[in-house]
Image (tube, rainbow, N blue to C red):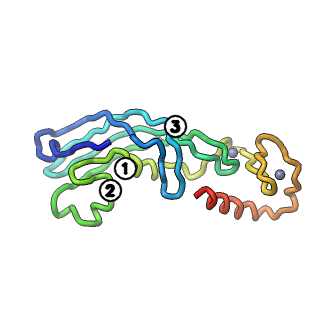
Amino acid sequence: MLIDLRELLSGSQDERIEKVSIESDSFDTGIAKYSILEKPEFELCITRIAKNKLEIKAESFVVLDIPCDRCLESVPTKVEYSVNEIVDFSDNAAGEEAKEEKDYIGGYELDVDRLVFGEILISMPGKTLCTPDCKGLCSICGHNLNVSECGCDRESLDPRMSVFKDILKNFKEV
Ligand SMILES: [Zn+2]
Ligand SMILES: [Zn+2]
């Protein structure tokens, strides 16, 4: 969803509150891609705080379908985010660096998905578990140990190996 900012920048409007929504059905972190299970409509508040300067605020959440770190079962995960940005459109602020940072601004349009995705990314949980005591997958046969015991002899494995297995697993998800 794109929002035209020209009226705000020209000064014919000082504040704009708009009901917006995320268009995309998936969220790509650059490493993994998650389905968006829930994405409520939310209010985006844009205020002209100075000549060529806009303040953008919003607060909402999404529910992402993130696999459990141990057993890979789907875990619907609520990610709350808030937007609190100031965009300077004056010529001296429009350097290449500033443009790269504000990739949700293209010309005089604001891209809601891009704006919000940047915030979701920094609000993502570091670890996702289906339950705090998830037993994970059998390191030998891959069976989900939350469902039942598979009977493999895992005791003989060096427990430090499981760390490497986790890392390998994460690589495979890419
Ligand atoms: Zn799990
Ligand atoms: Zn097994």
x%, y% of residue 47?
A: 22, 42
- Left or right position of 106 against 148: left
Amino acid carrying label 3: it is Leu
* Gap in angstroms between the C-alphas marked 1 and 3: 18 Å
* Gap in angstroms between the C-alphas marked 2 and 1: 7 Å
Which mark, by number, is residue 103?
2
Is 134 in front, or is 38?
38
Task: Give the mark nearest the N terminus, 2 or 3.
Answer: 3
Residue drawn at 40 percent across, 52 percent down: 118
Which mark, by number, is residue 37?
3
Task: Give the mark nearest the N terminus, 1 or 3.
Answer: 3
x%, y% of residue 101?
A: 33, 60
**Label 2 environment density (alpha carbons within 10 Å; few <14, some 14–19, many ≥20):** few
- Mark 2 vs ligand 1: CB under 8 Å? no
x%, y% of residue 106?
A: 26, 53
Residue drawn at 17 percent across, 64 percent down: 92
SS under mark 2: loop
Mark 1 = which residue?
A: 114
- State yes or no: discs 1 and 3 in contact (Cβ < 8 Å): no
Where 113 sits versus 174, above or below?
Answer: above
**Label 3 environment density (alpha carbons within 10 Å; few <14, some 14–19, many ≥20):** some
SS under mark 3: strand
Question: Which part of the image, by quadrant, shows the N terminus?
Answer: top left
Residue drawn at 73 percent across, 49 percent down: 136
SS under mark 1: helix
**Label 1 environment density (alpha carbons within 10 Å; few <14, some 14–19, many ≥20):** some
Task: Give the mark nearest the N terminus, 2 or 1.
Answer: 2
- State yes or no: discs 2 and 1 in contact (Cβ < 8 Å): yes
Where 73 sits versus 94, above or below?
Answer: above
* Gap in angstroms between the C-alphas marked 2 and 3: 25 Å
Where 100 sits versus 152, above or below?
Answer: below
Amino acid carrying label 2: it is Asp
